[in-house]
Image (cartoon, rainbow, N blue to C red):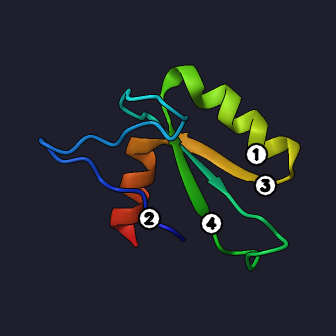
Amino acid sequence: MDSVPTASASDVVICSAKGCRVPAVWVLAWNNPKLHTPERRKTWVACDEHREHLSRFLDLRGFLKDVVTLAEWERSAADR
């Protein structure tokens, strides 16, 4: 799995939407089956405003695998 930058007190994860500078609260895990092995996960992060738009973009292409909160993603990464 690809990693999402973790946020520390001075480091904020910013939404992946073009031009957005808002802190991300969602992780969109995706995979392009023409390029990646089935278990590989690429990630985009999204703020509340852009989560649906970015999810829809990935889902229409058959790439979207999972959407979880950034906090959940970081907890699962810490458990690995």
Q: Which residue is mark 2?
A: 3
Label 1 near label 3: C-beta < 8 Å?
A: yes
Element under label 3? loop
For disc 3, the neighbor class at 10 Å (few under 14, some 14 to 19, many from 20) is many
Query: Residue at left 34%, top 43%?
Result: 13
Q: Amino acid at mark 2?
A: Ser
| Nearest to N terminus: mark 1 or mark 4 | 4
Q: Amino acid at mark 3?
A: Phe
Q: From the image, which quarter does the N terminus lie in?
A: bottom right
Q: Which residue is mark 1?
A: 58
Q: From the image, which quarter does the C terminus lie in?
A: bottom left
Report the disc number at residue 63: 3
Q: CA distance from mark 4 to mark 3?
A: 10 Å
50 w.r.t. 7: above or below: above
Query: Residue at left 12%, top 42%?
Result: 10
On the image, the x and y values in percent for residue 3 come to: 44, 65
Q: CA distance from mark 3 to mark 2?
A: 17 Å
Element under label 2? loop
